[in-house]
Amino acid sequence: MRDLKLPEERHPEKAHRADNAQPKKPSWIRVKAPVGEGYRKTHQIMREHKLVTVCEEAGCPNAGECWSQGHATMMIMGEICTRGCTFCNVATGRPQDLDLFEPGRVADAVHKLGLNHVVITSVDRDDLEDGGAEHFAMTIRAIRKRSPGTTIEILTPDFLKCAPSVLETVVAAKPDVFNHNLETVPGLYPEVRPGARYFHSLRLLQRVKEIDPSMFTKSGIMVGLGEDRQSVLQVMDDMRAADIDFLTIGQYLQPTPKHHAVDRFVHPDEFAAYEKAAYGKGFLMVSATPLTRSSYHAGDDFDRLRSARMEKLGRA
């Protein structure tokens, strides 16, 4: 039986890689250890419903804060990904069959946590003909039925090996926010995201808007992987050309010595400059801080995103 707690079994595709030094984190990266009743309650609900969270699988630094407030990003379709991105701590390998009861368990957990806004993500499932599109749609519908007042944000894979029509399946389920992360600048894709294609991911988000112009779209990148400022600004321009509403930028943190090395820790002042530049390019919402992650403060950010659209429409 495979033990995902063992690094060589969790990441067999990285076992041959030379170790990269893990530099000491600067003061602005430090976070508090997870404690408190809220954290324990969230953990208990996740375990009772046999749910996987990306907070745990990806080693998110904000897990303690979010879980203490009852917020957890649920990762559907298992805990094993068919891709082997060099930045990611999610296990790689051959996934198990889909659990058809999972959408119902997710919906029940959302209801018990009393969430006003929920983020649902997944591993890449290149082994499935539709990449898991119908499973996403089933999960969205189950949450809508159980908690009709909850807004739903999805963070999807790229559906690279699927028919273009599978995207319509997900969009037709009417999530409030459709997120797919570009992760890094195009020049770093061969090393950082070798199984993906930059312009395919960009086009995916553009097509969401073509299918449903009212749907909010969102994408994010990490910095500190070896990119330069000009390449980040070019990604912003590409995203705006695809009519993406919401941009997130966060610091890359190296999960293990076998993962892609941290090139540098980007200073908070640089993040502030990126935020200013992004708003200048027309994004409705921008979150750019060292600890920014796709689902960090997602509920509050969604309220701000919705208000920004109303204000923009009011000016039109």
Image (cartoon, rainbow, N blue to C red):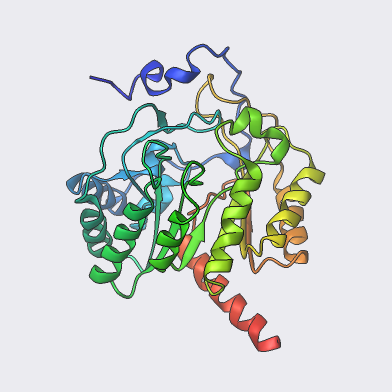
Describe residue 121's horizontal placement relative to residue 87 as left or right: left
Residue 272 appears in view: no
Describe residue 155's horizontal placement relative to residue 26 as left or right: left
Describe residue 274's horizontal placement relative to residue 11 as left or right: right
- Residue 17, given in percent of the width and then of the height, sits at 55, 14
- Residue 124, given in percent of the width and then of the height, sits at 43, 40
Q: How many marks?
A: 0
- Residue 114, given in percent of the width and then of the height, sits at 28, 66
Name which quarter of the figure residue 263 lies in: top right
Describe residue 77's horizontal placement relative to residue 168 as left or right: left
Residue at image location 74% in from the left, 46% down from the top: 232
Q: Which of the pair 107/64 is nearer the observer?
A: 107
Residue at image location 61% in from the left, 76% down from the top: 308
Residue at image location 56% in from the left, 71% down from the top: 305
Q: Which of the pair 290/90 is nearer the observer?
A: 90
Residue 131 appears in view: yes
Q: Which of the pair 79/174 is nearer the observer?
A: 174
Q: Which of the pair 177/118 is nearer the observer?
A: 177
Name which quarter of the figure residue 19 lies in: top right
Assign the C terminus to one quadrant of the image: bottom right
Assign the N terminus to one quadrant of the image: top left
Residue at image location 76% in from the left, 64% down from the top: 281
- Residue 242, given in percent of the width and then of the height, sits at 67, 60
